[in-house]
Amino acid sequence: MLTDWSYALQDWPTYLSAAWLSLRLSLAAFALAFALGLGGALARRSRYAVLRAPAAVYVEVIRNTPVLLQMFVAYFALPSAGVRLSPVQAGVLALGVNVGAYLTEIFRAGIQAVPSGQREAARVLALSPARAFAHVVLPQALRNVYPAVVNQLVQIILGSSLLSAISVPELTGTSMVINSRTLLTVQVFGIAAVLYLVLTNLVVLAAGLIGRVAFKPPLAVAARPRPLDAVRRLLPARSVPNVRKEAA
Amino acid sequence: MTTTDTTTVEKTVARISLSGVHKRFGALEVLKGVDIDVEPGEVVVLIGASGSGKSTLLRIMCDLERADDGDVWVNGVPLHDRKRAPEIFGQVGMVFQQFNLFPHKTALGNVTLALLKVRKLSRAEAEERGRAALARVGLAEKADSYPAQLSGGQQQRVAIARALAMDPAIMFFDEPTSALDPELVGEVTGVMRSLAEDGMTMVVVTHEMRFAKDTADRVVFMDGGVVLEQGPPAQVFGNPAELRTQQFLHRVLDT
């Protein structure tokens, strides 16, 4: 048994480089999704129907079709439209477009949750609508939705395993290759699972640290993404200092 | 044809001049023909029951609402002219019932945002003016506090400082003390009183009758979307001509 594990672990450089690819393409897809989400949210809130309508169609189509199918479209169908993408490019495109639809709705909700009095105060101070959005509305909206956005990033990392279906050598696909060579099924997929856990928790840890410095005043502990949050909830509750109460 | 210099005409008229202002929200007619003039340096307090149209009137004066009908001149800007109306922003200050401070910015950040982004001052200049404005409302030492770390009264004073930093020609106050605990009202009305003493032109919607009595130059009683009665506080409070005014004052002063 132990020899099986040590045998399986001999492939560690392959696992690590596959995990590294998973992380990189997830971050690339997230960057695309973030831009699409922000643009989509603005379009959905636009007073012009020519912007609202396509954004609404985008959200509906993407959220109601399987992501695996979207990847097949990006990789197998786009070439017949004259767009030929590498597996990694197609995968990043499909994942980014998919999660961008969810982020559109998340950002839209976050923007809507900013009280209208904030915009009115900005207007009387002569801030243009664009400035008011950039300096007043957006920072508050991002703060509102930060935990939900980080959750979408985790979803991208997990969803990137589907890219094995279009022959991207990411962590899941690579594990399958190693498995068919070694037949150490439990060990190979066990290692892959641990690496996914490490990847997602590293990302959540980084997001928590970013959330701590990026938002003023700092995010409350409850609103800050933390690794192993489900496990932490099993532990006895500690009293959490509250910024507002401390000041009063 | 002789050319009339319209700019000098605008300057000589009252600082605020509304005539025949109508406003409806759907089926509800909130303002039914309001005429009101405010002179430079005057402190006008609008009183009246909820729904009498006083807040709507105030919001029309700073272009947060647009009148359906009538002429609205504020500080020489015709707000009934859709093209020119936005000129008013930055020339007048507005203090809201709910403060509307920017929660992600410190007190100083709130006060300096428009100085930096609209007035295009350097950071040093903006902070100097911002700190002066905070000192004006007695909150110099709270410059680095976030709104959530301040009491309601302190937040409203920061909101006043934010408006003052833009060097406004007129200050509007929309029920500035209605969201405050009773013991915090005094610090806000105190700042407003000192602004009035400095000659600031002010239009105030409030339920603080003491403030109206001792600070207003003129009290305007609104009822059912029209100005029913107006005059010096001693006259309106001491000897109201209209029955509706008497009833309203009876209600608010006895409770």
Image: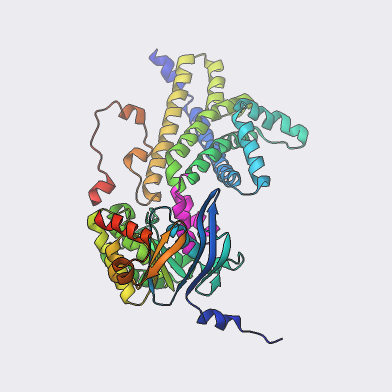
Q: How many marks?
A: 0
Residue B89 location in percent, x, y? 50, 66
Which residue range is magenta in the image?
A: A113-140
Instruction: Report the front residue among B156 and A148.
Output: B156
Q: Is residue B8 magenta?
A: no
Q: Residue at x 43, y 77 (%)?
A: B40
Q: Is residue B157 left or right of residue B76?
A: left
Q: Is residue A54 left or right of residue B245?
A: right
Predominant secondary structure in magenta? helix
Q: Is residue B79 visible?
A: no
Residue A18 location in percent, x, y? 53, 30
Q: Is residue A92 left or right of residue A82?
A: left
Q: Residue at x 66, y 45 (%)?
A: A49
Q: Is residue A120 magenta?
A: yes
Q: Residue at x 53, y 42 (%)?
A: A108
- The residue most toward the bottom is B2
Residue A27 location in percent, x, y? 52, 39
Q: Quarter holding the N terminus of chain B?
A: bottom right
Residue B163 location in percent, x, y? 40, 66
Q: Is residue A234 visible?
A: yes
Instruction: Report the front residue among B80 and B110.
Output: B80
Picture layout, residue B38 above or below residue B179:
below
Instruction: Report the front residue among A55 and A162.
Output: A55
Q: Is residue B204 left or right of residue B23?
A: left
Instruction: Report the front residue among B180 and A117.
Output: B180
Q: Quadrant of residue A60?
A: top right
